[in-house]
Amino acid sequence: MSSKRLLQSFRDALSGLKLAFRSEQNFRLQLLAGIVVAGFAMYFPLRIWEVILVILLLGWVLTMELLNTAFEYFTDLLKPRLHHYVYAIKDIMAAAVLVSSLGSAVIGAIIFLPHFINLFK
């Protein structure tokens, strides 16, 4: 792989992030939540494995949101809102984002709740 092609791959990926940011409200909300959680991770004295887990979960949720967006675009391209499977696919992908977000929120609460409790003691 040439360095020119590698650079173009990064440009393409950044273009995809920009598109998702501009067009998807949920992506912007997930990103904002991630920034807040990253701030908590820097503020509280977390163990290294907790920081790693928080970073992994942030990446996981944002990746799921990007996949959801890609599936929505793809299903609209194939059969734009004409087939009941289009609704099912979109609902299932939205459910995948919801499950990953809820799971991440529960793990985040387990990690951060003791720190918040100590903060207000």
Image: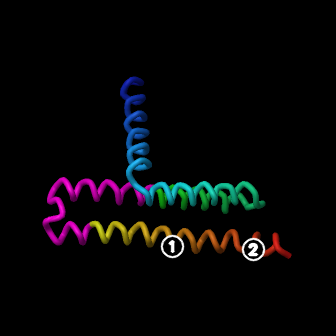
Give me the residue at 48% from left, 55% from top.
28
Q: Quadrant of the N terminus?
A: top left
Where does label 2 land, which residue? 114
Left or right of 18 in this view: 114: right
Q: Which residues are magenta?
A: 63-89
Residue at left 18%, top 64%?
81
Using the image, tell me which numbered label, if any, was put on residue 12.
none
Q: Position of residue 61 (x, y in %)?
A: 48, 61
Query: Quarter-wise, where is residue 40 in the image?
Result: bottom right
Residue for badge 1: 102
Image location of residue 49, percent across then percent down: 67, 60
> Residue 117, how many percent across, how many down?
78, 75
Query: Which class describes the residues within 10 Å of circle 2: few (<14), some (14-19), or many (20+)?
Result: few
Q: Is residue 30 above or below residue 118?
A: above
Question: Based on the displayed image, in which of its 4 quarters is residue 79 positioned?
Answer: bottom left
Q: Label 1 is placed on what type of residue?
A: Leu
Q: Which amino acid does the dot numbered 2 rest on? A: Pro
Q: Element type at marker 2?
A: helix
The residue positioned 42% from the left and 35% from the top of the image is 10
In the image, farthest residue toward the right: 121
Q: Is residue 112 magenta?
A: no
